[in-house]
């Protein structure tokens, strides 16, 4: 193990960091770092999943350093491949330092190089090279994180909580887990299926791998409430079991607490349990933009606390400034507030950053529909389908808007496609309700909402806030639905 670069010891690193903190008022308490994806220098160039996974695990390890702001994965990884100068990276990501490196795998040998760079000045604070056997990757990961964090504990007042909960007992399980992470981060149906298989392989190789069990639970919840293609009966019992297993093995892991929050919010409609689970996840990892995003969703949908939701999303945006999902959700909170003008402004800002982001087009279609701009709404929704695929919720909102626009034949064609998908597999009932609502078929809409309640539809919680359901709010059947969900306080 060789040490290179202009600074040769951890003490000198701390000296540099202290200098940065003293030059920038307030930074000593809010010191920040971005961990970029490692470059694959292996001869076969087949270690991309390993490089990304190693960086992601370093992000999670460093997140345990209290007082250190660790940039979330989405923003750190969005910079990859752009050839930006480190000072530009620091400016865009709003961080003090950048950790970057490379991986070269040859046979059973592994070489990992890392360097920590001052993002304001662009100079290297330190660099390290590790030559190890492949099965020693866990100690390499530890040593990189400890080099960044160990001296910070005593010299700058940070406190790192050491935990082995993220650790697999063998390399094969860890490799399967990293492959799962790589697949899950694509967030499409096919890739999440691959992720679920990889995580199952990880826990088969190491039944005590808490992080693998938590990841299985998250995949299952995504199929249930993220895209609504699997029923509660098919997913939730197994997700609960996997989350409980993860917590029994490692109660200090934030991931299973987050999953429990998602289940409590989307399936149980349990306000107290959802609040407690998200709060614990955030306590264990204050740098988790994802947990804060879902907590904001809870605040809007379960509590109607939209101002608090916006505050939580602003924190998430600070932690993950390039995450377009967070920025789009800000637009949706304005949408729930019926402030359609501000929602449109926010969503157009997202599309200025990335005109190919399907979720923002979907949101803008929702907004235009509420503004009565049906042609524009349909155009945005069709663009969302072109970019993101024709999932059942896309078909439903297109049917809904076509119905409102008086295009009955197209609305019914799309409704028939939703029914066909349900007969072939599963489609969340709420989307059939939404399609009927666009055709002003109120009784049919309530029939499908009743079915959604009976099946514990993962998207039913949207009725509490989404403007599409405003025509139903004065109907006693709507109040009765909220009462059955235990959400009487959200009645109009």
Image (spheres, rainbow, N blue to C red):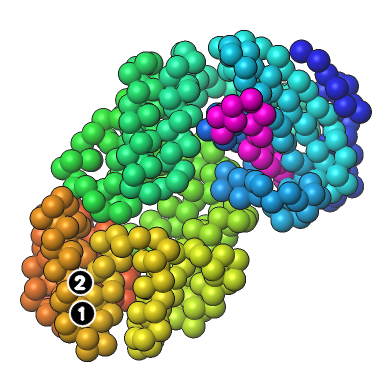
Q: At x 61% / y 50%, what residue is drawn?
A: 78
Magenta stretch: dominant SS?
loop
Element marked by disc 2:
helix
Horizontal relation, residue 294 to residue 313: left or right: left
Q: At x 57% / y 43%, what residue is drawn?
A: 73
The percent coordinates of residue 333 (x first, y second) are 44, 68
Q: At x 45% / y 17%, what residue is drawn?
A: 172
Which contiguous range is marked in magenta?
30-48
Horizontal relation, residue 374 to residue 105: left or right: left
Circles 1, 2 touching at the beta carbon (< 8 Å):
yes
Residue bearing mark 1: 410
Q: Residue furthest front?
A: 44
Magenta stretch encompasses residue 335: no
The percent coordinates of residue 75 (x first, y second) are 61, 50
Crowding around mark 2 (Cα neighbors within 10 Å: few <14, some 14 to 19, many 20+) is many
Q: Quadrant of residue 240?
A: top left
As rendered, which of 424 and 16 lies closer to the eye?
A: 424
As rendered, which of 477 and 198 lies closer to the eye?
A: 198
- Image quadrant in which the C terminus is located: bottom left
Residue bearing mark 2: 414
As rendered, which of 271 and 84 lies closer to the eye?
A: 84
Q: At x 15% / y 50%, what residue is drawn?
A: 425
């Amino acid at each position: 193990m060789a040490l290179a670069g202009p600074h040769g010891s951890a003490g000198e690193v701390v000296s540099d960091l202290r200098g940065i903190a003293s030059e920038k008022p307030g930074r000593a308490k809010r010191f920040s770092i971005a961990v970029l994806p490692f470059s694959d220098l292996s001869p076969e160039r087949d270690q991309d999943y390993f490089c990304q996974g190693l960086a992601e695990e370093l992000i999670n390890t460093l997140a345990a350093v209290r007082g250190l702001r660790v940039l979330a994965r989405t923003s750190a990884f969005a910079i990859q491949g752009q050839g930006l100068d480190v000072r530009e990276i620091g400016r865009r990501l709003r961080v003090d330092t950048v950790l970057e490196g490379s991986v070269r795998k040859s046979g059973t040998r592994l070489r990992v190089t890392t360097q920590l760079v001052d993002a304001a000045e662009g100079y290297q604070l330190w660099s390290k090279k590790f030559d190890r056997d492949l099965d020693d990757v866990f100690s390499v990961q530890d040593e990189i994180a400890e080099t960044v964090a160990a001296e910070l504990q005593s010299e700058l007042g940070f406190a790192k909580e050491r935990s082995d909960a993220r650790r697999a007992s063998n390399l094969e399980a860890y490799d399967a887990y990293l492959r799962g992470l790589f697949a899950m981060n694509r967030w499409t149906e096919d890739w999440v299926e691959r992720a679920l298989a990889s995580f199952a392989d990880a826990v088969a190789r190491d039944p005590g791998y808490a992080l693998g069990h938590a990841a299985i639970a998250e995949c299952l919840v995504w199929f249930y409430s993220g895209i609504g293609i699997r029923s509660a009966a098919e997913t939730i019992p197994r997700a609960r079991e996997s989350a409980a297993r993860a917590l029994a093995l490692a109660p200090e892991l934030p991931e299973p607490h987050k999953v429990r929050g998602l289940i409590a919010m989307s399936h149980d409609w349990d306000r107290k349990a959802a609040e407690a689970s998200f709060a614990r996840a955030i306590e264990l990892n204050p740098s988790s933009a994802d947990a804060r995003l879902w907590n904001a969703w809870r605040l809007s949908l379960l509590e109607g606390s939209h101002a608090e939701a916006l505050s939580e999303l602003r924190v998430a945006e600070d932690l993950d400034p390039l995450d377009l999902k967070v920025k789009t959700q800000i637009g949706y909170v304005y949408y729930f507030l019926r402030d359609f003008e501000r929602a449109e402004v926010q969503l157009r800002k997202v599309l200025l950053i990335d005109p190919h982001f399907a979720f923002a087009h979907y949101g803008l279609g929702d907004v235009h529909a509420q503004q009565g701009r049906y042609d524009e709404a349909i155009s945005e929704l069709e663009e969302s389908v072109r970019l993101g695929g024709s999932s059942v919720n896309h078909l439903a909102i297109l049917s809904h808007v076509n119905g409102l626009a008086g295009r009955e034949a197209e609305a019914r064609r799309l409704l028939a496609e939703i029914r066909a998908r349900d007969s072939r597999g599963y489609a969340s009932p709420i989307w059939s309700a939404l399609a009927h609502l666009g055709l002003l078929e109120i009784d049919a809409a309530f029939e499908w909402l009743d079915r959604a309640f009976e099946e514990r539809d993962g998207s039913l919680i949207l009725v509490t806030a989404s403007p599409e359901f405003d025509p139903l709010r004065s109907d006693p059947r709507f109040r009765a639905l909220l009462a059955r969900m235990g959400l009487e306080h959200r009645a109009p």
